[in-house]
């Protein structure tokens, strides 16, 4: 069951969020270097690949640790014309966007930032669905 699965992932504290965000940023930087460099020394290329992979793992960890936030926000929108699981799915898209755009240097907790993106995704999906019917 989805809700049981996401409940098993431990929540993060602010320091862990910043650490993951730094790893994500380093991974994105490494991916950019790999994509835009024609010739790299094999050792440097391998190091960049390791950093990029670590960034992807950090992104997944940050996503998984915040899936409960999506569920808690999606619950508020039930009974308004969309199925609960559809609300969660749309909220997860907002969460992905939040992870991609989060700037840890501003000093906000990730959940504060992500809440806006999750709500935005859910309410936009509800509006789109209302128009299609």
Image: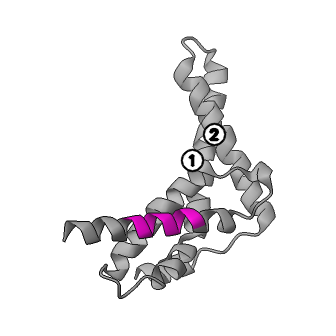
Q: How far separated are the C-alphas under marks 1 and 2?
A: 7 Å
Q: Which of the colour schemes (rainbow, by chain, secondary structure, one colour) is used? A: one colour
Q: Nearer the viewer, residue 83 or 130?
A: 130
Q: Nearer the viewer, residue 5 or 129?
A: 129
Q: Position of residue 21 (x, y in %)?
A: 70, 51
Disc 1 target residue: 56
Q: Classify 10 Å Cα crowding around label 2: few (below 14), some (14-19), many (20 and above).
A: many
SS of the residue under disc 2: helix
Specify whether 93 is left or right of 105: left
Q: Position of residue 72 (x, y in %)?
A: 54, 81
Residue at the spot 49% in from the left edge and 61% down from the top edge: 94
Query: Which numbered circle lies on residue 27?
Result: 2
Magenta run includes residue 119: yes
Asked whether the residues under the numbered discs 1 and 2 touch, taking CB atoms below 8 Å apart as contact, a structural biologist would say yes
Q: Is residue 57 visible?
A: no
Farthest residue, direction bottom: 79
Q: Nearer the viewer, residue 8 or 109?
A: 109
């Amino acid at each position: 069951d989805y809700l049981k699965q996401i409940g098993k992932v431990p929540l993060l504290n602010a320091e862990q969020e910043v650490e993951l965000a730094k790893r994500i940023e380093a991974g994105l930087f490494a991916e950019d270097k790999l994509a835009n460099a024609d010739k790299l020394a094999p050792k440097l290329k391998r190091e960049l690949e390791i950093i990029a992979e670590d960034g992807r793992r950090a992104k997944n960890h940050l996503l998984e640790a915040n899936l409960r936030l999506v569920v808690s926000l999606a619950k508020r929108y039930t009974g308004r014309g969309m199925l609960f699981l559809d609300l969660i799915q749309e909220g997860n898209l907002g969460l992905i966007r939040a992870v991609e755009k989060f700037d840890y240097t501003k000093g906000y907790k990730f959940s504060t930032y992500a809440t806006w993106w999750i709500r935005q995704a859910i309410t936009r999906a509800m509006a789109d669905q209302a128009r299609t019917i």
